Image (cartoon, grey):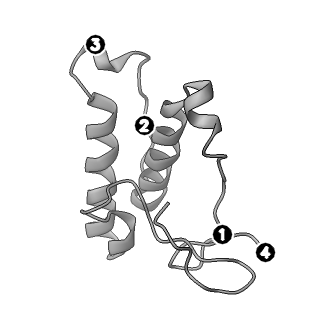
Amino acid sequence: DMPYLQDGTPVDMVFNPLGVPSRMNVGQMFECSLGLAGDLLGRHYRITPFDERYEQEASRKLVFSELYEASKQTANPWVFEPEYPGKSRIFDGRTGDPLNNLL
């Protein structure tokens, strides 16, 4: 009954949307997105803590560039939606219907 991605892969993690701002763990969402890109590209990443000290929004730029590259190299355009970077269409595991919003 787990939700799944457009290619049929079950979603590994589901976050409570209220938990991210209250716990200030936005980095966890970046890590999950970078993990998806790394899995599709066959890469591993080593990120130092506080990489934002080198450049403003360095984490977001890295994640989005890797998702974009993964979408091109794997012919999976759903990995990187230009209008909604970092979000993908998710399908209900019980009904097979797409959820109303990109996640």
Other-residue count near label 2 (Cα within 10 Å), few / some / many at <14 / 14–19 / ≥20: few
Other-residue count near label 1 (Cα within 10 Å), few / some / many at <14 / 14–19 / ≥20: some
Q: Quadrant of residue 20?
A: top right
User: x, y percentage for residue 99?
Assistant: 56, 74
User: x, y percentage for residue 6?
Assistant: 50, 78
Going from N to C along the chain, the mark reached first, 2 or 3, is: 2
Residue at mark 3: 53
Going from N to C along the chain, the mark reached first, 1 or 2, is: 1
Task: Tell me how far mark 1 sits from mark 3, CA to CA.
Answer: 35 Å
> Which mark, residue 1?
4
The mark lying in front, picked from 4 and 1, is: 4
- Residue at image x 26%, y 39%? 61
Q: Are marks 4 and 3 in contact (CB under 8 Å)?
A: no
Residue at mark 1: 10
Give the camera-side residue of 101 and 50: 101
Task: Tell me how far mark 4 sits from mark 1, CA to CA.
Answer: 9 Å
Residue type at the position of mark 4: Asp
Q: Secondary structure at mark 4?
A: loop
Residue type at the position of mark 2: Tyr
Task: Tell me how far mark 4 sits from mark 3, CA to CA.
Answer: 42 Å
Residue at mark 2: 45
Q: Are marks 1 and 2 in contact (CB under 8 Å)?
A: no
**Residue extending furthest right?**
1
Image-based side of 78 in relation to 22, left or right: left
Determine whether 75 is above or below 63 in the image. Answer: below
